[in-house]
Amino acid sequence: MKLISNRALREFANVHPDAVASLQLFRGRIEKGTFKNFAQLNDTFRGVDKVGNLYVFNIGGNKYRIVASIAFSVQTVWIKSVMTHTEYNKGRWK
């Protein structure tokens, strides 16, 4: 799949250096993967949930969240937001 906005991952990692390894692991799995649907995505990312039209990934042992939009037909993932678990729970990303 193609990842759009690796910049969001880099910017988050600059503020949260302990997230770098987890974010890069996420990026690598996305870019090497081919997912035809949510079920296939969930086989690789057990910590992913579908919330409306968005996908929420649990990253770094549930410390971080990545909110993304995915177009399976064109194999593209758009990062909408990267945040801590606490920020996610506040619901401002919705």
Image (cartoon, grey):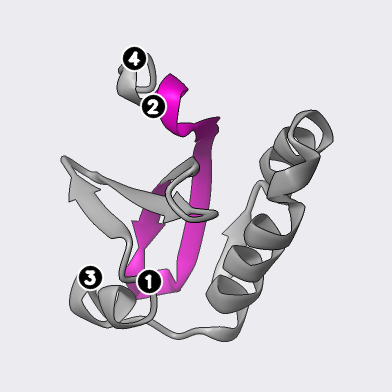
Which residue position is annotated with label 4? 90
What amino acid type is highlighted by mark number 1?
A: Phe
Which residue position is annotated with label 1? 45
Return the disc, 3 or 1, that comes first in the chain's sequence.
3
Q: How far separated are the C-alphas under marks 3 and 1?
A: 10 Å
- Are discs 4 and 2 less than 8 Å apart at CB? yes
Which residue position is annotated with label 3? 38
Return the disc, 1 or 2, that comes first in the chain's sequence.
1
Return the disc, 2 or 3, that comes first in the chain's sequence.
3
- Are discs 2 and 3 less than 8 Å apart at CB? no
Task: Give the main secondary structure of the magenta stretch.
Answer: strand
List x then y, in percent, for residue 92. Answer: 37, 14
What amino acid type is highlighted by mark number 2?
A: Tyr
Is residue 25 visible in the rendered structure shown here? Answer: yes
Q: How far separated are the C-alphas under marks 4 and 1?
A: 23 Å
Note whether 35 is above or below 2 in the view shown. Answer: below
Disc 1 secondary structure class: loop
Note whether 74 is above or below 64 in the view shown. Answer: below
What amino acid type is highlighted by mark number 3?
A: Phe
Q: How far separated are the C-alphas under marks 2 and 3?
A: 21 Å
List x then y, in percent, for residue 56. Answer: 34, 47
Which residue position is annotated with label 2? 88
